[in-house]
Image: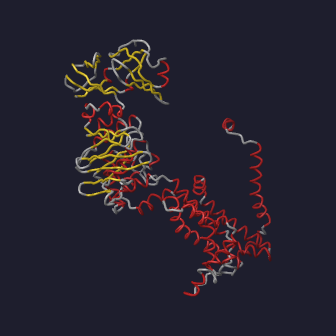
């Protein structure tokens, strides 16, 4: 041990101090949350119909969002990484803008397009009587709008890094372009796809601003767990603490379950 | 004629311009220095790139024609391609790598694997069929790459520097495999920058430089032709015309003892590899049969080798290490001693 330690590079003091402070900054809120949570009323809150409703809604919508993001985001990432279509830089910028937009602004933009008086929303309403706002699909749309860029960017970098020689080899072996994509390209980038899906799911699960702006706050239809937490904070702080703890644990479970592959992929992607 | 190719293509600053044809069952080597366009040429034939101008046809089928705009994509050409870095599918076992082409053509998994095993057995790869590509040595990995390409029963096999990345023993094994897999119904193109590989493995050689073909011919034609100085330079060899009498070779005023050979007495071409010649400050002790005094005409130094051009009585290039060259304390115009073993002087009928 001592011989190995002597060979390891010692961290400069300044970096060690600043890095440690950063760790404390991340740990402290979680620690405080765990301390303040009224564990004794855990069962009550979990038994509370409003909370379970919000929990189920959050899980269902975030999973649907992740699935849709993969179905559309992977092809988009492929086009951005591999095709020679003109204006790729511009398309990438537009498609990932919502990552850096304030979520409320994303919600307002969605209202302007798909709201009842929105550019497209009004047509949908007039033609087929479809009203998206304040429905569960609206929650998914809001989540998708802000979370899908995480998948697109992660997968695009995976496609860009993966060697094209194996794909060429597959073509010389008689594989059609689709066969090459599904049997060579996707397996070669599966860790990036998984990493992108996890990031997207996490972002979707935590979505608040765009959801409450575009989808509103209807119990059972659009009141997701983050919104429920915020509302609980106004009325019952203990409930808010418990729901928050619930989300921390939910995220932690997913993170641990995917730990090996997820960290590997993120490490490789950067 | 089976493959008739007229390839004109611009790649960066290189203008590729090569016309040639290949017969059924023939093995053609494409030789030339790095960057001459060898790989670009076979990639174009495979359909991984298209000609700017020209035409590639296989029997009566046009694969690529600039005039008509016909282009057959690589998956529809009856080819096999062994890539320089082998390009195995890292997520598939050896067996499934070999079965890939059969699966892609719609054959069921069980049948594809059965046929893949047959191919693996032929190339001697059955013993590692369950391994993943990351668990293979360089030689094994190449065996798999060859098996994978052979499994689809291609009519034209393309090999891009197949032996370059292998260690010495694996290279010998790979060459044996290359010779053994010769098949009258399969033509082969072998890209290499190793002259000896080209001379020993191919029926004909295409020498290419700066994108253009400088000579096409059989190995003995290339070695014998007057143009051979240029070609020999591309091949990186010293080719010398001389008179053979038993084991004595006369080149001008020089006489060299040669190694075992099958050439008849009379006019021959002698091949001396630049690396097989040793240079000395003083007359070397010991028993090299061929020792002579010469002078340095030119020195071309790169990072990992020094090429020394010797003057009379033998105008040849010698390649030594930079350290070895520095130890000679020589310069252009200086005298030095050269020696070469008899076994390193190869003679071919002229």
Closer-to-camera residue (B27/A122): A122
Q: Where is residue B239 in the image (x, y as percent from the top left)?
A: 31, 27
**Colour style of the rendered protein structure:** secondary structure
Where does the C terminus of chain B fall, quadrant-wise?
top left
Question: Tag count in the figure?
Answer: 0
Q: Is residue B350 among what the camera can see?
A: yes
- Corner quadrant of residue A93: bottom right
Question: In this picture, is A186 found above or below B270?
Answer: below
Q: Residue B104 vs residue B180: left or right?
A: right
Q: Residue B13 vs residue B343: left or right?
A: right
Q: Position of residue B275 (x, y in %)?
A: 39, 26
Q: Which residue is drawn at 29% across and 50% down?
A: B5
Question: In this picture, is B261 found above or below B212?
Answer: above
- Corner quadrant of residue A240: bottom right
Q: Residue B24 vs residue A206: left or right?
A: left
Closer-to-camera residue (B194/A195): B194
Q: Residue A31 vs residue A178: left or right?
A: right
Q: Position of residue A153 (x, y in %)?
A: 58, 60
Q: Is residue A135 among what the camera can see?
A: no
- Corner quadrant of residue B70: bottom left
Q: Residue at x 59, y 60 (%)?
A: A258
């Amino acid at each position: 041990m001592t011989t190995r330690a002597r060979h390891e590079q010692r961290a400069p003091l300044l970096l060690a101090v600043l890095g440690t402070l950063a760790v404390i900054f991340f740990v402290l809120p979680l620690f405080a949350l765990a301390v303040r949570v009224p564990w004794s009323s855990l069962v009550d809150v979990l038994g509370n119909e409003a909370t379970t409703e919000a929990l189920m809604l959050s899980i269902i919508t975030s999973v649907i969002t992740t699935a849709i993001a993969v179905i559309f985001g992977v092809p988009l990432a492929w086009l951005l990484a591999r095709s020679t279509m003109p204006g790729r830089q511009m398309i990438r910028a537009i498609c990932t803008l919502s990552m850096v937009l304030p979520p409320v602004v994303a919600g307002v933009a969605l209202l302007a397009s798909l709201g009842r008086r929105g550019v497209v929303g009004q047509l949908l309403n007039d033609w087929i009587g479809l009203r998206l706002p304040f429905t569960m699909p609206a929650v998914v749309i809001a989540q998708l709008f802000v979370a899908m860029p995480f998948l697109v960017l992660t997968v695009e970098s995976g496609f860009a890094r993966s060697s094209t020689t194996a794909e060429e080899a597959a073509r010389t072996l008689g594989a059609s372009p689709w066969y090459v994509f599904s049997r060579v390209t996707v397996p070669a980038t599966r860790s990036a796809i998984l990493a992108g899906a996890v990031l997207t799911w996490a972002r979707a699960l935590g979505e608040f601003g765009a959801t409450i702006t575009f989808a509103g706050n209807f119990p059972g239809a659009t009141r997701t767990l983050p919104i429920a937490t915020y509302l609980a904070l106004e009325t019952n702080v203990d409930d808010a603490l418990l729901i928050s703890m619930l989300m921390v644990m939910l995220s932690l479970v997913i993170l641990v379950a995917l730990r090996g592959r997820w960290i590997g992929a993120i490490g490789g992607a950067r | 004629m089976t493959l008739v190719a007229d390839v004109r293509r611009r790649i960066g600053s290189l203008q590729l311009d090569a016309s040639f044809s290949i017969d059924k069952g023939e093995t053609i080597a494409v030789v030339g220095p790095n960057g001459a366009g060898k790989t670009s040429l076979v990639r174009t034939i495979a359909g991984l790139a298209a000609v700017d101008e020209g035409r590639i046809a296989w029997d009566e089928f046009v694969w690529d024609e600039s005039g008509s705009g016909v282009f057959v994509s690589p998956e529809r050409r009856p080819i096999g391609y062994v890539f320089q870095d082998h390009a195995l599918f890292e997520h598939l076992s050896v067996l499934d790598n070999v079965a890939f082409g059969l699966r892609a053509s719609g054959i069921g998994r069980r049948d594809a694997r059965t046929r893949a095993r047959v191919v693996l057995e032929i190339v001697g790869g059955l013993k590692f069929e369950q391994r993943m590509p990351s668990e293979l040595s360089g030689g094994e990995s190449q065996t798999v790459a060859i098996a994978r390409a052979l499994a689809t029963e291609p009519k034209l096999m393309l090999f891009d520097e197949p032996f370059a990345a292998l260690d010495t023993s694996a290279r010998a094994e790979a060459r044996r495999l290359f010779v053994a897999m010769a098949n009258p119904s399969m033509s082969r193109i072998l890209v290499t920058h190793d002259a000896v590989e080209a001379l020993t493995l191919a029926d004909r050689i295409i020498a290419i430089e700066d994108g253009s073909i400088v000579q096409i011919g059989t190995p003995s034609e290339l070695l014998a032709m007057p143009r051979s100085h240029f070609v020999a330079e591309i091949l990186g060899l010293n080719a010398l015309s001389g008179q053979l009498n038993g084991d004595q070779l006369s080149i001008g005023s020089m006489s060299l003892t040669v190694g075992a050979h099958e050439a008849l007495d009379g006019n021959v071409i002698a091949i001396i590899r630049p690396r097989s010649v040793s240079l000395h400050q003083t007359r070397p002790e010991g028993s090299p049969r061929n020792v002579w005094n010469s002078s340095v005409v030119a020195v071309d130094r790169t990072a990992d080798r020094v090429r020394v051009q010797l003057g009379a009585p033998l105008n040849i290039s010698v390649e030594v290490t930079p350290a070895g060259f520095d130890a000679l304390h020589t310069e252009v115009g200086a005298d030095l001693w050269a020696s070469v073993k008899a076994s390193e002087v190869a003679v071919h009928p002229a």
